[in-house]
Image (cartoon, rainbow, N blue to C red):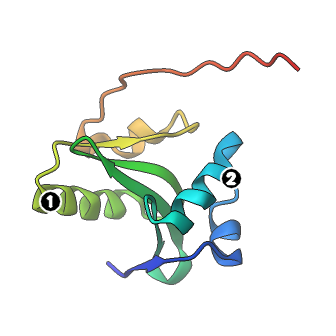
Amino acid sequence: MVIEKVRPWCEELERGLADTFGHDRDAIVEGVNGGWLEAYRLWHGQAYMVTRVERGELTCCCYQGARVCEAMRWMRAQSSRLGLTAIVFFTRRPGLPRLLREFQPAAEETVYRIKVA
């Protein structure tokens, strides 16, 4: 797997993750620039992701692009090496559990947003 950290935030990350941010874009950019989130380019730009480690878990905050199962294998190996207990994905894609079925993902929460203005 070809994986490269990217920092600071740049136009390449902006394009590579544009479909993933939701309302959290500014917080993600700030986190990558501040070093508490890590951004990656996978397979020379076939995919991009942003992760963090917190409370013994690896959280994938954003992932856009191809080869998500291969990326998950890498994340699982890294998590095991670091002694982490779980990998958490934030997603708006209902098909993600089907794509990752070999890893037996379990849904733990659902978020509903009620717009006021």
Q: Is residue 70 above or below residue 44?
A: above
Please name whichever residue, 66 or 64, is drawn nearer the observer in this view of the structure: 64
Q: Amino acid at mark 2?
A: Asp
Q: Amino acid at mark 1?
A: Leu
Quarter location, residue 45: bottom right
Task: Looking at the image, tell me whether mark 2 or mark 1 is earlier in sequence order.
Answer: 2
The percent position of residue 49, horizontal first and vertical second, equals: 49, 62
In the image, 5: left or right of 101? right
Give me the disc on residue 49: none
Disc 1 designates what residue? 82
Residue for point 33% across, 64% down: 70
Q: Is residue 61 above or below residue 67?
A: above
Q: Is residue 100 above or below residue 32?
A: above
Viewport quadrant of the C terminus: top right
Viewport quadrant of the N terminus: bottom left
The percent position of residue 11, horizontal first and vertical second, equals: 71, 76
Give me the disc on residue 26: 2
Residue for point 49% across, 21% down: 110
Residue for point 40% across, 38% down: 98
